[in-house]
Amino acid sequence: MMSSFQEIEAAMKSRVCKMDCELLCKTRGWSYGVCNTDNEFSNETVYRAYQTGVDVGIINTEKYPFLTFQSDERNIFRGLFREYTSLNASEPINYEEWLIMNNFGILPDTQESLFERKIAKRSTADNKRRFVNTVRKGDILITGRGVGGLIGHAAIMTTDYWVLEMPGGRGWQNGIKDNNRQISKHAWFDVHSSDWTTVYRNRDASVAHAAALWADHNYYNPSGGAKKTIHVTYKITTDIKSKNPSYCSKLVIQAYYFGTGKRKVISNLSVSGRVIVPTNIPIYFMHPYTLVNKGKY
C-alpha cells in the first residue's frame, strides 16, 4: 500500500493535480482547498495550508518550521500565487492547491526549502569553486528564484561549462521574445550566489549527455555551434510539447523526454494539464533513470 506522500506524488505526476489531490485529501479526511476570497491569506488559511503540507508528507516540521513558512508565505508565495492566478484565470485554483502543485517550494528528496537561508560554513569563493568543479554535462540546476507564478527556477548544463536556461523577467505575462540563453557556470553561480543552487545528476551518463545535446540543438543552435540561431519566447502555458513558447522547467523536462530516444526516462507527458514546476522536476524521472542529488551550492 502506498504511503500518503506517494499517493499525492502519483496524483501530481498524473498532472491532473487539482482533481486528484483534492479527491485524495477528501478521502483521507484532510483539509484541502480554501476558496479564493478576501480572506485567502488569513492567519487561519496560512496555518491550514501549512498543516496540509505536513499531513501529506511534503513538509518536515523540523526542516521547515511554521514560522519560516509563514515568512516565505508572506514575502514570496503570495506574490507568486497572484501572478499565477492572473495568468490562469480560466482555470481557477485555490491557494492550498497552488502550494501543493509547487510542493511548497520544497525539494522532494531532501525536504529542504529552496528558500532556506544561505548560511554557508565555507566562503562564497570556496562554494563557487566547489560548484564549478561539480557540475557536468546534463546536470539539472534548481534554485529558488521564480517567475510567472512558479516557485523556483531550473536550467540544464549543455556541456561541462555552459548552462542553458530561460530566465524569464519583466513582461513575462505577455511573453518575452528571445529569452533562451547560454551562460557560463561561473556566471550562473554569480547570479545566484545569494540563493542555494541544488545540482541533480541522472544516474545514466549516456542519458544525461543525450538530453544535453537535444537541449542545445533545439534551444540554441541545431548544429551545436557557439552562435545562437534559435530564438524562443518565454511564456508559461500548459502546452507541454511545443518548443516555442517555453519556460525554464519545461525546457529541462523536454530535453530528457524527447532527447533520450526510446528509453522511458520521463513519465508520460501526454496526460499533462498543468505547467511543470521546478521543484517537482525530480519526480518526473522513472527508474532506473532517477536523479541523484549532488549537493547544494
Image (cartoon, rainbow, N blue to C red):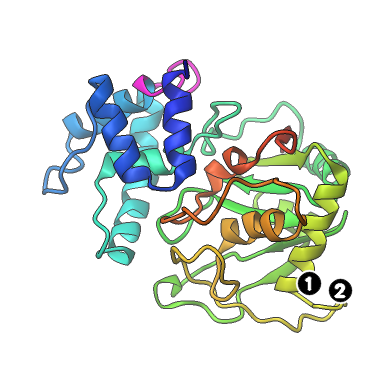
Q: Nearer the viewer, residue 226 or 91?
A: 91
Asked if residue 278 is positioned above or below residue 158 in the image, the reply reads above
As drawn, is 126 to the left or to the right of 238?
A: right
Asked if residue 63 is positioned above or below residue 231 in the image, the reply reads above
Q: Is residue 47 visible?
A: no
Circle 2: residue type: Gly
The magenta span reads 55-65
Q: Which numbered disc flags the more N-terminal residue, 1 or 2?
A: 1
Give me the residue at 15% from left, 44% from top.
35
| 245 in magenta | no
Q: Residues within 10 Å of mark 1 (few under 14, many from 20)?
A: many
Residue 21: x %, y % from top left: 33, 36
Give residue 224's mark. Answer: 2
Give residue 186's mark. Answer: none
Residue 14: x %, y % from top left: 46, 44
Give me the residue at 16% from left, 48% from top.
36
Q: Secondary structure at mark 2?
A: loop
Q: Nearer the viewer, residue 269 or 81?
A: 269
* Image marks 1 and 2: residues in contact by CB distance under 8 Å: yes
As drawn, is 146 to the left or to the right of 205?
A: left
Provide the residue designation for mark 1: 217
Number of numbered markers: 2
Asked if residue 271 is positioned above or below residue 24 in the image, the reply reads below
Asked if residue 224 is positioned above or below residue 123 in the image, the reply reads below
Give me the residue at 65% from left, 41% from top.
285
Q: Nearer the viewer, residue 169 or 231?
A: 231
Q: Secondary structure at mark 1?
A: helix
Circle 1: residue type: His
